[in-house]
Amino acid sequence: MTFNWILATIAAVLILAGLSFYLGRLLWLIKQQQLKQQQVVDAKNADLTQSIVLIAKAMREEQCELSEGALRIWVLLDHLQLPNKPNAIQTYPGLFKMYDVVKDMPTHQARKERDKKEIRHLDHLREQAEIDLKAEIMADVHKLLEFFQNLK
């Protein structure tokens, strides 16, 4: 009976050791996967940040139309994954207002397929919004550049 008890104890210890090793390996693999995912997110954020800063600088230097810059920046901000990312609508209201004006306007081929009168009307709305919102947008561009400068 004592011999069976010793064998059972040894078997239990071996099973526990094997399961512990297996669990440890799974936890290590999960940690490695999380690290790889974070590296992918960090690389994507770096690319997005670089693009946002480049567009914002072009807007500041008036090398990019405010409507185009607002549209592009807004989409990029939406894809940015930062833990301390501010609420973009509250933080950059001018950019949001401009984005809201142009987000549904046709571009590329869809624009070519529209009636010229309609395109002139949409262009007028966009241009008027750029004039009306210029001060707000430029203030937002400054805040945006400052935010990304402080991230470094």
Image (tube, grey):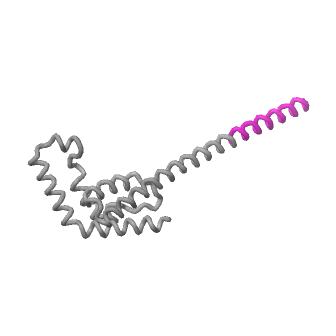
> Above or below — where is 80 with respect to 112?
below
Q: Residue 36: x percent and y percent?
A: 57, 46
- Left or right? Give the position of 28 relative to 74: right
Q: Residue 94: x percent and y percent?
A: 27, 64
- Left or right? Give the position of 121 relative to 41: left
Provide the major secondary structure of the magenta segment. helix
Q: Residue 12: x percent and y percent?
A: 79, 35
The quadrant the N terminus occupies is top right
- Residue drawn at x 36%, y 68% as measured from the top left: 143
- Residue drawn at x 66%, y 44% as measured from the top left: 28
- Residue drawn at x 87%, y 29% as measured from the top left: 4
> Above or below — where is 93 with respect to 23?
below
Residue 145 counted in the magenta span: no
Q: Nearer the viewer, residue 106 or 15?
A: 106
Furthest residue in direction right, as rendered: 2
Q: In which quarter of the image is residue 30?
A: top right
Q: Nearer the viewer, residue 46 or 89?
A: 46
Residue 6 counted in the magenta span: yes
Q: In which quarter of the image is residue 139?
A: bottom left
Q: Residue 124: x percent and y percent?
A: 13, 57
State how many labels appear.
0
The magenta stretch is: 1-23
- Residue drawn at x 24%, y 59% as measured from the top left: 98
